[in-house]
Image (spheres, coloured by chain):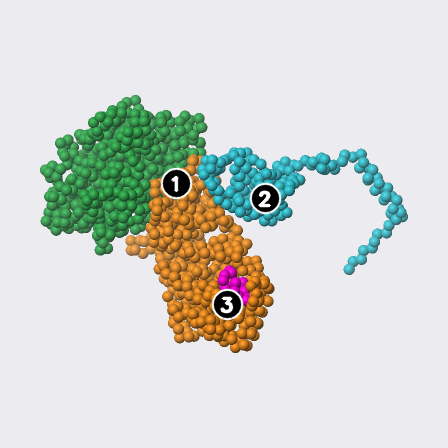
Amino acid sequence: MPEMVNFTLDGREVSVPRGSNVIDAAKQCGVEVPHYCYHQRLTVAGNCRMCLVEIGMPKLGPDRKPEVGPDGKPVIAFAPKLVIGCNQAVSEGMVVNTVTPRVRKAREGVMEFLLINHPLDCPICDQAGECRLQEFAVDYGRAASRFVEIKEHKPKRVPLGPKITLDNERCIACSRCVRFMKEVAKQDCLGFVERGGRSVLTAFPGHEPNTNYDLNIVDICPVGALTSNDFRFRQRVWFLKETRSICPHCATGCNTLVSSRENVVYRQQPRDNADVNQSWMCDQGRLNYRFVNDSARLTTATVRAANATDATPVAWSEAVAAMASALRNAQHAGQGTAIIGSARATTEELFLLRRLGKDVLRTDRMETVSRAGKADGFLVSADRNPNTLGAYITGVGHGLPESTIPEICAAIARGEVRALLVFGENIAKHGIPEAILAKLDFLGVIDVLPNAVTKLAHVVIPGMTFIEKQGTFINGKGRMQRLKPGVRLAGDIHPEWRTLGTLLQALGAGEYADFDAVFQDMVRTLPPLQGVTYASIGDQGLDLKLAERPGEEAVAWNLP
Amino acid sequence: MKTMDRPKLTFAERFYIPQIIRGLWQTLRHIPRKKITVEYPEVKPKLHGSEYRGVPTLVRDPDGRVKCVACQLCEFVCPPKAIRILPASRDAVRPDGNVEKEPEVFEIDMLRCIYCGLCEEACPEEAIFLRKDFAVTGYTRSNKQKLLELGGTHADRIWKWKNK
Amino acid sequence: MINVGTKLEAEIDRIIAQYPADRKRAAVLWLMHLFQERDGMLTPAHVTWIAAKLELQPIHVWELVRFYPLFRDKPAGKYHIKLCRTVSCEMCGAKEVLARLQKKLGVGLEEVTADGQFSLSTFECLASCGSAPVLMVNDELFERLTPDEAERLIDRIRAEGLPTPPLSRPGPAHPRENRVLLANMSDPAYGGTLAEYRARGGYTALPKALAMKPADVVEEVMASQLRGRGGAGFPCGQKWKFLDQKSGKPIYLVCNADESEPGTFKDRQLIQHDPHQLLEGMLISCHAVGARTAYIYIRGEFTHGWQILQRAMDEARAAGLMGPDILGTGVGCEIFLHRGGGTYICGEETGLIESLEGKRAYPRIKPPFPAVVGLFNCPTVVNNVETLSNIPHIMNRGSAWFKGLGVAGSMGTRLLCVSGAVRRPGCFEFEMGKLTLRELIDDVCGGVPEGRTLRGVIPGGTSMPVLTADQIDVPLDFDSLRKAGTMAGSGGIIVLDDSSSVVSLTRNIAQFYAHESCGQCTPCREGTGWMEKILHRIEHGKGRAQDVDTLYDVADNIDGTTICPLGEAAAWPVKAFVKKYRADFDRAAQPSAAPAPGPEAPHA
């Protein structure tokens, strides 16, 4: 429990952790102190002057004790000038006023100054609808303009690297981007040239931002000066639905907001999580979402007879039944079966795959595909699968370096394994070539996009991407985080937990009425997840504290 | 429960003749009177002033630039969601206005449009106006080309983008 | 690619060594000066080379090239003319000189003549207001120019090359003056060398101070009640006491020689004509505050000034008066020169510190104060040239003597600079509070020119609120001026008569602050430009009645909301002029008002 200080905010006595500045303290108490240049994760600049408030401290008498006035309360000595809240730590006994006429006038004044040279770009500016200039102008500004001079003209549509466009007329010189590039992205390449009202943000030619974190400056820019080329002019933000999700591209599991309209994803942004990604995400992960609405997405289940070249579209239920039948036949004939799972699948999906393998098919042959890259020391993990720990905990995956895929491949080649279920991976590229797959009696695939494996499959059932379904990922540090459905594509597409659940039911292995039933069964069955409830995961995830939990197998969790 | 008795008819009422004569008299009374019927379509009705709301249209300025910059405020405010816009980039450094955005697609589903005029009210660019007439016909639905055709030229006084 | 010979590289390495080893960035302004002096301008290749040498990103150098007006990224003529456009010079005819020069050379501002010989630009106050109008051609200053003389100067330069006029100095003392700081230079033969300084009793205070404990020196200065002479008037000894002596970090003394407050030209005299007085003051002060290293931040336009100081420092070092062991006492002190780039905001102490560290001169938010976190994050004290020049005299003659000069609350003498509409402008030294502003203007400076009426007086540099003609019976000391609703400021007194319109003067001042605003914080960045534009419009007959109230309100919104006092400095003159000369403004803002005569105000 952090140490608290007591202070008075607009006449109310409140308590906040020691060391909080006035802006954060007020926010905790439900009071907004408007600001532009201050950002929790960056150093303080104090240049926008929007957070000016009245600060007073108890007056100390000659004995260094607070003087007491006639009303029995401490006499407060107010600072002669308004003080910026971002640089002021709250201390015991402080009095902060945020709604006095002086503060109101200061805010109106600052708003007016910000708007006088600001271009009338709202109709064409991407920031409209999420622009703090717009919002604070309405809340704290003057209604009418009294500026009749010619505005300062500055460069517009300046490329700042290939991903970002800069509009200098809109810039309010808050310097958030300069501080971010220096302090977080570690490429100190932005600065201001010219002086005074002619100040212009710029990068030295040839030294534009080129890190994997540049697009974060578009997020933190309070106005439309920095815009993302990927999102430029694509959609107005007030049409966008924001879904809280998790980035599925590496084991960090950055918390994200996925913006969509009518089932089309338009952009991704990071979501605050102090324990995972602070307020940031990498550009590669951020920009990698177009596969969701790819026109090649599988939308219907198909069935291909053994000697046919073409597959026939069938209803989902029929496909599931066909898959169940094929697997049942393989089992009764005593043939070997195997499952290729994915460490990009949700924990619940992996749990159902485990049940299929262990409880129904009674096979040891289960593996997931590993993806190793280079960690960048910040947010990009060396492990490019978001749910490797989910694969371990469910026992579907064993990971590097002892992947059992070559062994499964050999077993298929030998004819020992005659039926294979491939879940969410193009296994032809990851260890079992088409020639080997062609030997199978039954190849069943659940995936989202067509590939060499779906072409060879006897049954293909379309799956869902991370933004279309419920589920959880366990990130590389043992944090369980949940996905939420935000988009629903047209077609006969069902969440994989329902497909696998129905498959299990058809094979006589129990029934799952809904997602919750799957989750309950999962946490009941797997010791590392005992006691976890879906609600306890919340929007910030749940640290499973795996190091303190017993493991089902004697395998270290291999936390990076 | 309250019972109400049907009132008893008098002899004259039962006979119907007086009623028929009353009816005929009403008709005859109207014959010499001034008729208010307007014989449409040979005679068009007079619309009252500036409040009439006709078909929505897009306008150009005297330089020929499409005034709409695809801000999508009209799409948002439209109550029946009749408007669909696809914004696009426009080469901005042009003599007819330094503006970098324009609508690539601008469609109004006229079966949805309720002629409320909120789009005209919301537009910050004076780019969409409702016509002051009715009975507009054509062979195409209201896509951008048709809307511009119907809208014509707006006598712009502000020239917002010209001097930027 | 730029060619850097061994000699230049050695010079560069020597300069880099002036600063702490992990703070090479501080050398950047010096390097930019060196390359521009050699090559005429700074190109992207220069930027990249300097950045690599100092282990910076190119943007860190580029942002300085485009912040400090002394640096150019476009070629200039062989003779680059910088004409002062600020208040006193404009009042004395700078506009006409500019027009004549443009006609003579056939170029506009920022243009180069076809033969590449001349280029022309305007500059803000060059700190020689008493001899207005002035201009600089390369490193030389030319004073009291009429349009004819300006033309003749061009011819002379074309014929014979650039002349080197003697550096003017204060004239003979007026009977009411009491010259302490100006005593030596009052002798026209005094050359400011070490020998001459010593012959007049110089460097006797230094050994005396070195024999005392530092705390005792501080107490002596405290006892003298010396108040800062830079503009704020804060007690010097008190400022020294604020220094954090317990941090374990080195302590720095910085001399603020960035005299840029319009109307002020006193530090120029002290630097150019009696450099050893300043050096002795600095050495004693370093001993008092425990500083082993001191920097003199001298404005870039003082081209002779820094060379004179460098010679004086070399003399002092050779004589054992400066260095690791001063006069065998075991006390060490090194003073280094740091040239600025032409920016008023470097006169603000934290702006100066940022500039010294090699960055754009963006003032810091306070707290923390420089006494705790200053130059290179170490405890630092910044003192004005005149303040430091007083120290040897206080040590020599004692605080009691100092207290005997002046009046209560404003002890000692003060250098006062008078310029504008007076017959005898100049730099003088009076005991504080011993004469009124009216006496200074009428008795000492001869009053306004024949046939003219006094309209007002700015008493302490353009930042301070103006006094109307009937408000100038105020004694010239800190407290009397504060009671009169203004401040003593930098001691730059500008006299206004009816030959200039008040609106024009206010516009000139507003233009100055808009140009000098660093651009860091919102109210100053946007507000100063707005005030300039409104005043420009009113001045040119396009005002509207409501503009005057708007103007006042804009100034009021800047006052008190900015990071540094430049906000107040920009707001106070506008508020004071509008309040005290409301009728002038209202008249000018009438739709029927005629525009101010003459060419458009030069705007660099």
Q: C117 left or right of A507? A: left
Colour orange belongs to chain: A
Q: What element carries label 1?
A: helix
Q: Which residue is drawn at 45% across and 58% down?
A: A256
Colour cyan belongs to chain: B
The image shows residue A242, relative to residue A113, as above or below, that is below
CA separation, marks 2 and 1? 44 Å
Question: Which residue carries the number 3 mark?
Answer: A438
Residues marked 2 and 1 touching at CB (< 8 Å)? no
Colour green belongs to chain: C
Quarter holding the N terminus of chain B is bottom right
Residues marked 1 and 3 touching at CB (< 8 Å)? no
CA separation, marks 1 and 3? 72 Å
Please state the chain letter of the residue tagged with numbered disc 1 in the rendered image. Answer: C
Q: C141 left or right of A21? A: left
Q: Position of residue A335 (x, y in %)?
A: 51, 75
Q: Which residue is drawn at 38% across and 69% down?
A: A401
**Kind of residue at badge 1:** Glu
Question: Which residue carries the number 1 mark?
Answer: C526
Q: Position of residue B34 (x, y in %)?
A: 76, 34
